[in-house]
Amino acid sequence: MRAVHLAEVPGLAEAARAIGVDRGIDYLADREVAAMLHRHRRLLGRMNSRGAWGGLLLVPGAVGA
């Protein structure tokens, strides 16, 4: 959903700006929000792959027990 659609909802634009001021992001700037979501997806992907490798390292110990 783009910011132009969100701005049509009464009071939403003001609330989004107030929340964004505290967090240092303009939630009505489409490019800024898209970049933030991309960073979060990359971070979650890295966390998932590291968790899988960590689990594989524990398998030999679990099998030995």
Image (spheres, rainbow, N blue to C red):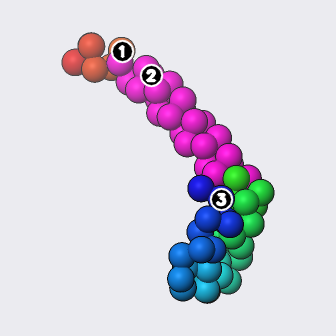
Residues packed near mark 2 inside 10 Å, few (<14), some (14 to 19) or many (20 plus): few
The image's mark for residue 36 is none
The residue under label 1 is 60
Could you tell me which secondary element the residue under label 1 belongs to?
helix
Check the image and report above or below for 8 versus 51.
Answer: below
Could you tell me which secondary element the residue under label 2 belongs to?
helix
Looking at numbered disc 1 in the image, what kind of residue is underneath it? Pro
Q: What is the C-alpha distance between the residues marked 2 and 1? A: 7 Å
Looking at numbered disc 3 in the image, what kind of residue is underneath it? Arg
Q: Earlier in the sequence, mark 3 or mark 2?
A: 3
Most foreground residue, 62 or 40: 40
What is the quadrant of residue 8 in the picture? bottom right
Q: Residue at x 44, y 22 (%)?
A: 57
Q: Residue at x 65, y 59 (%)?
A: 2
The image's mark for residue 2 is 3
Residues packed near mark 1 inside 10 Å, few (<14), some (14 to 19) or many (20 plus): few
The residue under label 2 is 57
The span picked out in magenta is 35-59
Looking at numbered disc 2 in the image, what kind of residue is underneath it? Leu
**Eye-nearest disc, 3 or 1:** 3
Q: Residue at x 62, y 80 (%)?
A: 13
52 vs 64, left or right, is right
